[in-house]
Structures are given as C-alpha cells and as structure tokens.
Image (spheres, helix red, strand yellow):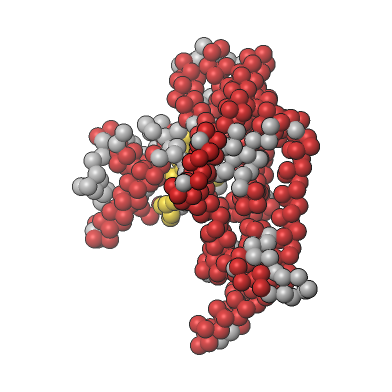
Amino acid sequence: MNYEDIAWQVYLLTGPAENIQSVTHCMTRLRLVLVHKDEAMLAKLKKINGVLGVHDAGEELQIIFGPGRVDRVTEAFSALLSNQSASKEQDSTDSGEEKAAPSALSAPSEAKSSPTPPKTSTKAAAEAAKVGDGKALHAKIRAKNATPLKLLFKRIASIFIPLIPAFIACGLISGTLNVVSKVDPAFAQTAVYQLLAIGGSTVFWGMNLFVGYNAAKEFGGTPIWGGILGALLAHPGLASVNLTGEPLVPGRGGVISVLLVAALAALIEKQLRRIIPEMFSLFLTPLFTFLISGTIAICVLQPLGGFLSDCIGTAATSAIGSGGAITGFILGGTFLPMVMLGIHQTLTPIHAELLARYGVTILLPVLAMAGAGQVGASFAVYCKTKNHFLKKTIASALPVGIMGVGEPLIYGVTLPLGKPFIGACIGGACGGAVQAQFMVGAATLGISGLPLAAATDQIPIYLLGLVTAYIGGFIATWLIGFDDPPEES
C-alpha cells in the first residue's frame, strides 16, 4: 500500500493548505480541522482505497484508517502539507496558479485529474442516507450530541487519547506476563520477568503527570502546571506530612484529583494574568499559580478526588460483582446507544481510574462486546442480502471490525439498516453477560475485539464471550430480519 498516494488523494479533497487548520491522529483516525468541508468531500474521501470510514465530528473531520496505517498516512500527509505550505510561500506572487504535487511524492494520474467535488446541500444530503454511507443519520446524531455537557465529556476523553498507546503497550506486556507466569511459575522469579513487570506498570507511575499536562492544555492553561501539580499529588514525600492527625496519602484520588486540580490551575492562571502587571507576570504568575493551586489541591481537591475515586471503584466492582451476568447484559447491550448519545465519553476516565486502582478495568471487556455484536449482526446481513454493494461494504469492514474498529460496520451497515443495529445490541448484551459473570479484567484501554484478549486476565473466558457476542448478534439479526435495499442503477 502506497501511503504517499493515499495522503495525496486526501489532500486533493481537503486542501489547499489554507483550508487545513490542524492535523493530528489517534489510534485509528486521521483528525483534521478544516475551514471548509461539505458532504461531497466526505463522500469522495470514503471512496479512497485504504479509508475505512469518515466521521464528521463537527469542528473535526475524522478519517478512519485503522491501527498502524493511520500513523503512516498521517506522517505522509503532514510532510505533504508542509511541502505545499513551503511551496506557496516561495511562489506567493503566483498564488492564482494551481500547484502541482511536490516532487517528493508521486501523485496518481487519476487523482490529478479528479474534478473538484460538487457542493451538495445539507438538506439533500440529510435525505440521502443509504447503506454504506450513513451520513444523514450520523449528522443527526452529531447535532443532538453537541450539548455543552456532552462536549465537556468529549474534552475530558480527549485528555486520555494521547495515553492510549502507552496503555496498550503496558497492558499487553502485563497480560502476556500473566499468562506466562501461570504456565511457568518459575519464570516469575527471573530478572527478565521482573524487568518486564516494571515495564508493564510504568504507565501508572507517570499517569498523573501525563493526565495533568494534557488536562491543563485542554482547559486552556499552561500544560506544565498540570504536570507538576499531578506530580505533587503523587509525591511520596506527602506520606511524611501530617495535617489532620493522619499522614497524607500520595496519589489519593488518582486521575480524578489530577483532572480537578489541572482545571483549577488553568482557571487561576488565567485570572492571575489579568491582574498581575506584565513586568511581574513572568515570575509571580507561575509562583502564585503553583502555591494557590497546590494548597487547594492538597487540602480540598485530593480528599474530594479520593472520595469520588472510591465511589467509582466501589460502584463499578459492586455492580458487576453483585449483578453478574445481568449487569453485563445491560451494559453490553446499551453501550452502542450510549455511543450514539455521546455519553460513552464519560467512561474513559473511569477506565483509567480502575486501571490505576486495581491494575485492570472490568468494564472494558464487557463494553467491548458491543463491537463483537456488530460483527455478528453484519455477517448475518452479508449472508441474507442480495445487494452486491452491501456485500462488498461488509466484506471490507468485517476484518477491521474483528480487530476492534467498529465504525465502518456501525455507520455503513447496521445503523442505516436499522434492525441489524438492534441485533448487534443483543449480541453485545450476550457477550457482556459472559464477561461480567466471570469478572474478566483488562490491563489496558483503547483496544477491543480480538486484540484485547492478550491484555485480559482470563483469555479463554474473554474469547468465549467474544464468540458468544458474534453468535448472539448473528442469530438476533437473522431472526429480526431487515429490509434488503435494492441495487442502485
């Protein structure tokens, strides 16, 4: 696969350079903030070879490539954008002329000759939702989810997105060691095992710093203040300080306390910059930001965060521990609607908190079954449909769905068809019941589907739940049925 060609085709549709305000990526998606975009652009992007789906998240356009591929495409796209920007600066007097592809990249002839996509009215696009597309349904969902509270949830979730690669790496190491130590207990006494065990827990030792840094940045403050305040809350020296008759507890409240103090520090810093004269701001603003935020953090926010953290941990473990399969059935079956409503963003810090407290999150294996239900439901559609385009869409999306990337199946198959989406929820509920009944834990976040098995503490049970979700989604969708769309002329 030629990543430079893919990047060039994406640029042809999203460019020129002045139209692209920022370029970032997560584990599966190239994320672009564009000045202008339209429905025709989204439709053209979906047809690029290698693109698994397109998600218009309001101010951000997300192009789904999947794990691994997205890193290579983003690298090529960023290099292309830099070259184009530099070229425009050098040829500013010829700004009216069309720019050619940079010599470092080979643009495909078909891409070069592609006409500019025609603009499509939003109303017309909203009425044109179809299988393999899902644009109109997605647009309606996005509009409903653009509430201040849900946007706050999204901002909080984005704090943890940069940490996901570290969670995956450390979680897979911990999960693998857990399996190996059961097969060969003597290996647990070796230096190699001990070093790998340290590596697997490293993300938790630095998590307060990273979360604090990202949170302060997200809330509009200086990132380093969030980082050092996170370090303050976890500093081992706190154990030797006695304020209320009992020594302070380093790390109490986990990421909840860090999120609170980072948000507070950003607010205090903004206010101090308004009232402190410019000539003193360089040294007084940092000093007072740290002293005021740190004092409130130790005396108020850390105890508050500790209380909230205890509540979250107890609620999660008690709900699954006492409710068992019933709780798992409900959580696994309702997770896809939660995604549609945008409230699934609230679960990211909960996963992180459970990982910090217990070393595993028992929620992730349950919720991951929703994606497995999608796979089973989509395969049922594949077996029953007579529509060749729909079969092609499912065949291309099923492999990545099995690997935990469910967006192409959700927005391209089950959601536009309607009834298969219900079948997918039923499949997710069945798989979630299995995971909760045996309290399967995962030592990571950010992955699901088959790859998550390696990071769980009960691999055979997790795989059993996965297969159960596949079968449940398939049977439910087969029995419920769906209106098979006619072939397009």
Please name whichever residue, 474 or 37, is drawn nearer the observer in this view of the structure.
474
Q: Is residue 336 visible?
A: no
Please name whichever residue, 457 or 263, is drawn nearer the observer in this view of the structure.
457
Q: Residue at x 69, y 52 (%)?
A: 149
Find residue 73 and report its horizontal and vertical position in percent: 36, 43
Up/down of 276 relative to 425, above or below: below
Up/down of 344 relative to 331, above or below: below
Q: Residue at x 56, y 86 (%)?
A: 277
Q: Residue at x 49, y 25 (%)?
A: 398
Find residue 95 and report its horizontal and vertical position in percent: 28, 56
Please name whichever residue, 296 or 21, is drawn nearer the observer in this view of the structure.
296
Q: Is residue 233 visible?
A: yes
Please name whichever residue, 260 or 459, is drawn nearer the observer in this view of the structure.
459
Up/down of 277 relative to 187, above or below: below
The quarter holding residue 385 reads: top right
Left or right of 242 in this view: 105? left
Which quadrant would the N terminus be assigned to in this image? top left
Left or right of 109 in this view: 332? right
Q: Residue at x 46, y 21 (%)?
A: 395
Which quadrant would the C terminus be assigned to in this image? top left
